[in-house]
Amino acid sequence: MSTSDQMDRVVNLCKRRGLVFPSSEIYGGFRSTWDYGPLGVELKRNVKDAWWRAMVQLRDDVVGLDAAILMAPKVWEASGHLATFTDPLVDCRSCKERFRADHLPKSGACPNCGAKDSFTEARHFNLMFKTFVGPVEDDAAVAYLRPETAQGIFVNFANVQTTSRKKPPFGVAQIGKSFRNEITPGNFIFRTREFEQMEMEYFVPPEDADRWYEYWCQERLRWHLDLGIPESKLRLRPHDTEELSHYSTGTSDVEYEFPWGWGELEGIANRTDFDLKQHAQSSGQELTFFDQEHDRRYVPYVIEPALGADRATLAFLLAAYEEEDVPNGKGGTEKRTVLHLDPRLAPIKVAVLPLSRNERLTPVAEEIAGSLRSQFMIDVDTSGSIGRRYRRQDEVGTPYCVTVDFDTLDDQAVTVRDRDSMTQERIPVEGLVTYLRERLPW
Ligand code: GAP
């Protein structure tokens, strides 16, 4: 399967199985926006939960925050986003298409119509969405949709530090929507104008910033690997000086090898004391930390790992997707599509499949489903042959199928099938939750 085929097939699977739909589809869609369907919302929630668990729950040096999307416009003035959060925009004079100047091919030809040297001079285009707060649409009412969640953390630095009584090194994590008026959104959910970010600002003494930057680069790489992204598809790429954001002295991207090439999955940046200093100056509030032990006051430096929830979801889907030949039970082979998702990310953990809709089997299957429902996200599928139902679960990555058959009525046991190995085991109903719990840790 070629890599572009793989992308098409994943997008197709997402639509067909209710993971991701084109937004406003009945009106013909709306400019690279996407909606997460019943299975997609579970998958993305699991990605966010895995991040929150690793970044907040399992650490005693990081706390959470959920700040507002709309913030005082002064925030964006102080952070530098109003002045510098821009992309260079060019138009092709021939076909009128718009492009980011820094994304053009080296040949100088228009990627749309092929015209040579047809581009206008680059204009700087601010990526922040503007809106108005209240009924009057004048300059005093202008507000912006946040283009990163990070600023909500910086402006709450003192609130969080004093109420949580944390001392550097400590972090504040946040998951939430961000908005950027991207010139060229695309590649499905990779680059969109509305997306979710998972960001953590880690406040450290300035002299320790380099060490913590290295630490977070390795820690974040490890997170992706642990959740099933193969090592061969992942790399850490330090930015060149001219690539650095206005606030950063050092950034590395965790890159994934997408079907169209290597692309940024996550950025880890040393933001120095830029943001806290800017907000202190602009607001007149002191945003420092007093280190009693060494009797000194300082502005902490910040190391920031910032990951897109949608981009991460896409990478997990692509890495998990496989079409393989498997025995068809008649001496030949057949194709099966399977998502080898880490069980922690799988939208459905267990499918309960009564062999038939027989009146004696149905109540037993319902009782088993009832005992599992409070523990795991489950699905009950009663239609089609058992082989077809296995395939349906395989292609959305369900790790375990529990088949209830006529023997169950006599031996009070069920068949549990493993998605990846396709092996089957007979398990007593009594021990089923424990069996599954051991294999599905959370
Ligand atoms: N606070 C730092 C920051 O926002 P960024 O590299 O611009 O840094 C962090 O964004 C992550 O957010 C990216 O690595 C990517 O995963 C995700 N992201 C950024 N722009 C996006 C977009 N237009 N669509 C989807 N995800 C995006």
Image (cartoon, grey):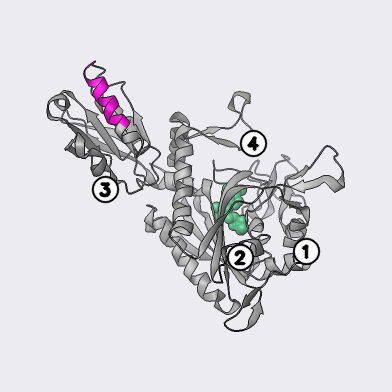
Q: Residue 406, percent across and down?
A: 16, 23
- Quadrant containing the N terminus is top left
Q: Percent from the top left, x then y, of residue 320?
A: 38, 45
Instruction: Identify the residue position indicated by label 1 in the image.
Output: 283
Q: Which mark is residue 438?
A: 3
Q: Earlier in the sequence, mark 3 or mark 1?
A: 1
The residue segment tinted magenta is 358-370
Kindly indicate whether the residue at mark 1 contacts the one at mark 3 (C-beta within 8 angstroms). Answer: no
Q: Kindly indicate whether the residue at mark 2 contacts the one at mark 3 (C-beta within 8 angstroms).
A: no
Residue that mark 2 sits on:
161
Residue 298 figure quarter:
bottom right
Distance (Cα) linking label 3 and label 4: 44 Å
Residue drawn at point x = 64 percent, y = 33 percent: 30
The magenta stretch spans residue 34: no
| Observer-nearest of 317 and 161 | 161
Q: Cα distance, mark 3 to mark 1?
A: 52 Å
Density class for disc 3 (Cα within 10 Å; few <14, some 14-19, many ≥20) is few
> What's the amino acid at mark 1?
Ser
Secondary element under disc 3, as helix, strand or loop, is: helix
Confirm or deny contact between disc 4 and disc 1 (CB under 8 A): no
**From this viewpoint, which residue is outermost toward the top?**
359
